[in-house]
Amino acid sequence: MEKKPLTLYLVRHGEAGGESRPDEVGPPLTARGEKQAAKVARRLANQEFDHIYSSDMSRSYHTAQAIIAYHASTPYTVSADIREVSVHHVLPGRTPRQKAIIDRMAGSEKSVKKFLRQLLKNHGNGEKILLAIHGNLIRLLLYKLAERPSKRGLPLMITNTSLSVAHLVDGVLDRVELVNCVKHLKPGEYA
């Protein structure tokens, strides 16, 4: 039997800002972020997924909810293991206070590895999995899947609600089909 790749659809959350709401982790989507999430959701409306995952952080959770509106019967899991990761070298210009806030809410590389092991254990041959997550995490996942050391990360631009698509064979990155695609947004709808 021919092995088909496991395909990961990596969607960065919509634009977020402001104060955290009660019972939510991190800043919520802005009005612009909600529009971005609605547009990526429409883009993916006709794509079939075997499972959808999101971070438990407000911005990723609500981006996933927009997508799930078109995929009500698709299994969905929220995980704290795929929170944004603090990677200061890809966050230029952050103040020490901003870095401290990010560190306090951030997940860890250890959590990401745990999630990735579980994902690869539970999903495989020909499945299509969507992750509504964070920019630094997308960079880190692509690096880990390519079996590269993550000290420097990948210098990729990952725009709000961009779509990246990676294919894995036997848990190893086979090819990256798409990175940071925002064709569902018009110029000016993203930064």
Image (cartoon, rainbow, N blue to C red):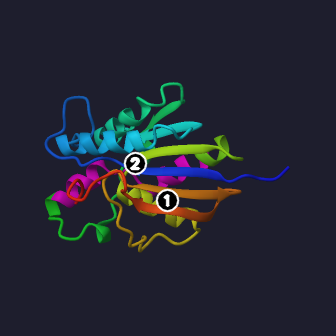
Q: Which residue is mark 1?
A: 141
Instruction: Kindly identify the residue that appears in the image at 34 percent across and 40 percent down.
Output: 63
* Magenta stretch, residue numbers: 98-118
Q: Residues within 10 Å of mark 1 (few under 14, many from 20)?
A: many
Amino acid type of the residue tagged 1 in the rendering: Leu
**Rendered image quadrant of residue 19:** top left
Pick whichever, 29 or 43, lies toward us: 43
| Relative to 145, residue 35 above or below | above
Q: Is residue 23 left or right of residue 50?
A: left
Tell me residue 55's x, y (percent): 40, 42
Q: Identity of the amino acid at label 2?
A: Ile
Q: Position of residue 145 (x, y in %)?
A: 57, 62
In primary-sequence order, the first of circles 2 and 1 is 2
Q: Which residue is mark 2?
A: 133
Q: Residue furthest right?
A: 1
Total marks shown come to: 2
Q: Quadrant of residue 121?
A: top right
Q: Residue at x 51, y 50 (%)?
A: 9
